[in-house]
Amino acid sequence: IRQRTRQNAGSQITATFILAVAITSIGSGFQHGYNTGVLNTPEEVIKGWMSAELDTPSTSSMKIIWSTVVSIFCIGAMVGGGFAGACANNLGRKGALMMNNVFAFIAAIIMGITRTTEVPYLLMVGRFIIGINCGLNAGLAPLYINEVSPTKIRGAMGSLYQLNITIAILIAQLLGTSTALGTETLWPLLMGLIGIVGFLQLVGFFFCPESPKYILEKKNDEQGTKMVLDRLVGSNSHQQFIELKKDIEDAQSLPKVTLSQMVRQKKLRTPLIIIGVLMAAQQLSGVNAVIFYSTEIFKMGKLSDEAAQYATVGVGVINVLTTIVSVWLVEKFGRKPLLLVAFGGLTICMTILFICLYFVETSPFAKYLSIVIVFVYLVFFAIGAGSIPWLLGPELFNTAARPTAISIAVPINWFFTFAVGLLFPPLQAVMQQAVFLIFIVCSVCAFIFIWFFAPETKNKTIDEITALFERNSWRCRLFDC
């Protein structure tokens, strides 16, 4: 590969580094985002087929069945996320990501033959299996990107994973329209495309190095680590090696971190609480209610079925464009300020949407304002609440604690994704517009928590970040640390 370099805060960025980040963020981010949004626009087509195959169950029964199809993906992701740390330690970061594509192949085949076999429940099985793939990706991909990236650009590189999630959601929404693959005969192809992406990522990883941290920590191969760093950061590899070796030596001076130790040790418990709350807050902001059911939300705003589909695609476009901007913003302004702006904006947007939906029947202004607010909501989510919780996970913990912490944080995120996906439709049917009050309260609580407890990690080494949780400050005392 022809080496192309640019100077960035003393680090030389090579073609190998660009390839490693691209293969990881695009391949893993695609599976995460595509499978989150793929059922949105073709919902009525697939539900109609399932209803016919199941001898037309009642509307309430079909709502439960469809909620299960959507949310069982998250159960699989919780399972996969729970094994992310073990896979990262035993197979390597790159090795685990390569192995993970097996789940994508299996899921693609099962969902691709669902209509041919006339067994609707195969769609649930496939969704569960691809959920395992996405749960592993959510833990492994940010970890790998974090460990191959220089400190100065670590935040921007970490944001690329979220960017590719949003791009994949948009692709899924475009392909799922009735003018593309969202038809009665082509929707199985829509579900099976994930196998092609899995194959391309698998091939791409043969040209990428293993994480230098894994090579040095698990294999104790200093020469191999230096060679990998030469490929990743060029002339700055010596300084990177010194920092990496110190980080690992500091981590090895501590006992192996287990789940019980994460809870008992003061300097680990505090960041674990912080990342757990942020992962929960990300989903309880209501974003996946918007993504999973944005077409229905636009129908609540009295758009026609076709107009609601195109508005949903517009949501994806806004999400992508704002996330691109956030890649720059996260290194310019830092993590904590963007989180505060994001959750403050989400609270305001949800409040306005809640009010507007009460007047859509009588006010054309409220009808169109509710649609605009959904777009503005996605802007606030993308600039902070979307990418930063995934970025902070690897940043808050040292090498020894990182895999265990990620294995806890990722299932928390997927659990709340599952809860929102499963409970939003029946709650919306009962509470109508008032269902958005739940998300408003959660966003307010998240804003308060971030204001008082979330640290700023921009341009800080792991030693500096760890020191934040060892100080005897009043904030730490609230966590008994």
Image (cartoon, grey):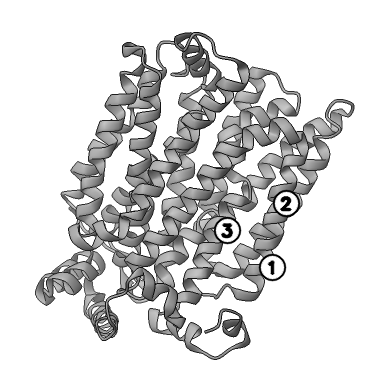
Q: Is residue 72 above or below residue 444?
A: above
Tally of marks: 3
Can I make out residue 106 in this image?
yes
The location of residue 177, given as percent across then percent down, is 51, 21
Kindly identify the amino acid type of the residue bearing the numbered disc 2: Ile
**Quadrant assignment, res 117:** top left
- Which residue in the protein does label 3 denote? 384
Image coordinates of residue 477 in percent, x first then y, are 59, 85
Q: In front: mark 3 or mark 2?
A: 2
The quarter holding residue 336 reads: bottom right
Residue at image point 68% right, 49% down? 439
Residue at horizontal 66 percent and vertical 41 percent from the top: 375
Q: Tell me if residue 282 comes above or below residue 246 in the rendering.
A: above
Mark 1 surroundings within 10 Å by alpha-carbon count, few (fewer than 14), some (14 through 19), many (20 or more): some
**Residue with the mark numbered 1:** 448
Task: Give the residue number, with chain letter if any, for mark 2.
Answer: 440
Query: Please, which residue is most extreme toward the bottom here?
Result: 472
Q: Position of residue 266 (x, y in %)?
A: 46, 82
Q: CA distance from mark 3 to mark 2?
A: 17 Å
Is residue 168 or residue 401 the one in the foreground?
401
Is residue 98 shown left or right of residue 112?
Answer: left
Give, as a three-letter code, the residue at label 3: Gly
Please report whichever mark, 2 or 1, sits nearer to the chain's N-terminal start: 2
Q: Earlier in the sequence, mark 1 or mark 3?
A: 3
Of 266 and 23, nearer the camera is: 266
Q: Secondary structure at mark 1?
A: helix
User: Does residue 194 appear to the left or right of 354 in the view shown?
Assistant: left
Q: Who comes first in sequence, dot 3 or dot 2? A: 3
Is disc 3 in contact with disc 2, using a CB cutoff of under 8 Å?
Answer: no
